[in-house]
Image: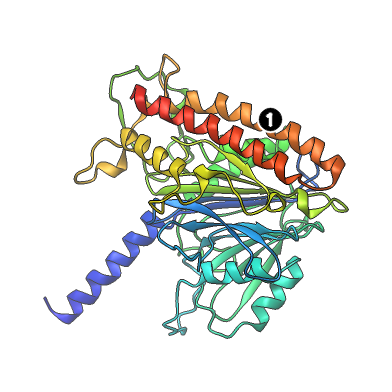
Amino acid sequence: MSRGKFLITIVLIVLVSATNYYACTTAIVSGKFTDDGRPLLFKHRDASFEQNRLMFFDDGRFTYIGMVNSVDTDGKEVWGGSNSAGFAIINSASYNLKSENDTSALIDREGIIMKIALQNCKTVEDFEELLNNLDKPLGVETNFGVIDAYGGCAYFECNNFNYTIIDANDPSVAPFGYLIRTNYSFNGPQEKGYGYIRYLTAEQLFYNAAATNNLNYRFLLQDVSRCLKHSLIGVDLRKNNYTEFERTFVTFEDYIVRYSSVSTILVHGVKKGESPKLTTIWTILGFQLSSVAMPVWVDAGKNLPSGLIADGSGLAPICDKALMLKRKCFPVSRGSGKKYLDVSVVINDKNTGFLQEILPVEKEIFDLSDEKIKKWRTLVHIPKQEAQNFYNSVNEIVTGFLDSLINKH
């Protein structure tokens, strides 16, 4: 193979990797527009690492909880999280921000910068100052989404040397109080980047939710991260009547949830004047169509639910169980099998699909969590022992439920 053909092959591999493995869908919702007055920060994560877990950190100015790849045993990179000051951050890779004359070799430092931000930042302004002070090039091409406990909520469309701030509180850019980013940036050339179809799908969901006063954490976790609509071809897989136990394969490309989806992290912030200790972090580990959302709080301390953190194998048990079920969703392992979903496993005419069984269990957890946080808001902190007991209870519910699904299928 000639050197020219070799380089072309490498470029193609990189492009395929980008479209398949870094197709995150993210959003910010200003507290001025949510149904409870609290901001939301959302990341539906796609990555090449299926095994994700949570970690509690006390290695900075602030303590924080972050999403990490399970292979990253020391937590050197964080892919979304929130700290004890109520500052939270996520990102989506962008593929249209790097200028043509940027020859920097430094890349893929988004997780490192998000970790530094969680260690040190209290406000959106702190994050801006951090970006200004870090050595250049930054080694990033991304949309950083951030919220704080003082009403701040913005995207930073950021490359190696520059960034543009898009404020979710600014009605000229966010007239309905929300911003969405997939894998392109609004300040880059629109003929480049990825995720335009997913963006439109999410935009339709958010627009309808805003019109019906339904912008809340439940909507993001159940209706966005588990969305089975396709905005380009006009399909909604949830509306079809698939037969139980009768394999029905559909091409599963350019949906918000896809084969490469590995986790969701959602930060439910606080109102101005509320304690940042009350910030809630929701996570779905493994695969959104075969896992269950669970909440954690930084103020509850370092002992996170056992299903969400590394066990003796280095993996999070709930993530591992969700991935076992994911294999049932994509039973064809050879060739292009990853592109084809057996939709009858997810939703069917007997209401025994994974999603149909997950949503009621998740609603139970939502209701229990709302009851707890309502009480804790009157206390202005999270009682550690009560939170630990709650973690154990929810962990038992989710673990038992996933085991029952594995045994049935």
Q: Residue at x 43, y 58 (%)?
A: 22
325 in relation to 194, above or below: above
- The residue tagged 1 is 368
Q: How many badges with numbers are in the image? A: 1
- Specify the amino acid type for callout 1: Leu
Which part of the image, by quadrant, shows the C terminus?
Answer: top left
Rendered location of residue 101, percent (x, y): 46, 85
In this view of the protein, which residue sits in the foreground, 264 or 229? 264
Image point (22%, 69%), residue name = 9
Rendered image quadrant of residue 245: top left
Residue depicted at 35% across the width and 37% down the height: 324
Per the image, label 1 sits on a secondary structure element best described as helix
Counting other residues with Cα less than 10 Å from the Cα at mark 1, is it few (<14), some (14-19), or many (20 or more)?
Answer: few
Q: Which of the image's four quarters has the N terminus? A: bottom left
Residue ranking furthest to the top: 350
Please state if 258 lies on the left or on the right of 384 as rendered: left
* Front residue of 179 and 133: 133
Report x, y in % for residue 153: 73, 58
**Residue found at x 74% / y 72%:** 126
Question: Which percent across, then down, holds residue 42?
Answer: 61, 50
Whether residue 295 sits left or right of residue 329 in the image: it is right
* 390, above or below 91, in the image: above
Q: Measuring from the top left, give residue 46's x and y in whole percent.
A: 44, 52
